[in-house]
């Protein structure tokens, strides 16, 4: 069986503000559809990604800003972090988890700076969209076998 992640729905309070934020940080606008009955679907895709996010009106009953731990991977986390900061994103500095495996929720166990030994999977930075949905940048230079 082959399954691919296609879309993640995220809750936002202001669709136009979210669209401006995501396109402003480089996501591609794929769609913006409205129906006569009040459904609005906006789809944007991170540059280079096969998966997208969708937000809009009448799409979810989850409160805006409650999505945590969405991950964006990059081979150059310092460069991606700098570009996001240049685009006005309030992004953390680089950090790694003290245990070196993944990372704990809510900022616990974070150590400032890049992971001292691992090129891939161990270094992170984080930011939130205007509603407070959490995004994590993760550096992946060489993928684990089978990935």
Image (cartoon, rainbow, N blue to C red):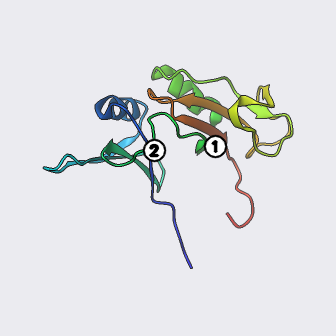
Between the C-alphas of marks 2 and 1, the distance is 14 Å
Q: Earlier in the sequence, mark 2 or mark 1?
A: 2
Q: Nearer the viewer, residue 25 or 60?
A: 60
Q: Nearer the viewer, residue 25 or 71?
A: 71
Q: Residues within 10 Å of mark 2 (few under 14, many from 20)?
A: some
Q: Residues within 10 Å of mark 1 (few under 14, many from 20)?
A: some
Between tags 2 and 1, which lies in front?
A: 2
Does 64 sit left or right of 121 as displayed? left
Q: Is residue 116 above or below residue 40?
A: above
Residue at position x 64%, y 35% in the image = 77
Q: Nearer the viewer, residue 57 or 61?
A: 61
The image shows residue 140 at horizontal and vertical percentages of 68, 47
Query: Is there CB contact under 8 Å for labels 2 and 1?
Result: no
Does 86 sit left or right of 109 as displayed? left
Q: Nearer the viewer, residue 59 or 88?
A: 59
The image shows residue 47 at horizontal and vertical percentages of 45, 44
Quadrant, the N terminus: bottom right
Q: Residue furthest bottom?
A: 1
Residue at position x 33%, y 35% in the image = 19
Q: Is residue 88 above or below residue 15?
A: above
**Tag of residue 75:** 1
Indicate the quadrant where residue 22 lies: top left
Q: What residue is shown with label 2?
A: 46
The image shows residue 12 at horizontal and vertical percentages of 39, 36
The image shows residue 42 at horizontal and vertical percentages of 31, 45
Quadrant, the C terminus: bottom right
**Tag of residue 102:** none
- Which element carries disc 1, helix, strand or loop? loop
């Amino acid at each position: 069986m082959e399954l691919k992640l296609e879309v993640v729905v995220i809750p936002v309070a202001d669709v136009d503000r979210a669209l401006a934020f995501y396109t402003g940080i480089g996501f591609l606008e794929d769609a913006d559809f409205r129906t006569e009955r009040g459904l609005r679907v906006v789809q944007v895709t991170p540059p280079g990604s096969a998966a997208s996010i969708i937000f809009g009106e009448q799409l979810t009953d989850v409160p805006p800003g409650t999505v945590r731990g969405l991950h964006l991977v990059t081979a150059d986390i310092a460069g991606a972090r700098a570009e996001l900061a240049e685009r006005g994103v309030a992004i953390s500095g680089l950090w790694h988890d003290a245990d070196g495996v993944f990372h704990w929720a809510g900022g616990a166990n974070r150590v400032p700076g890049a992971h001292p030994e691992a090129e891939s999977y161990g270094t992170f930075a984080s930011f939130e969209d205007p509603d407070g949905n959490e995004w994590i940048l993760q550096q992946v230079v060489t993928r684990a076998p089978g990935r």
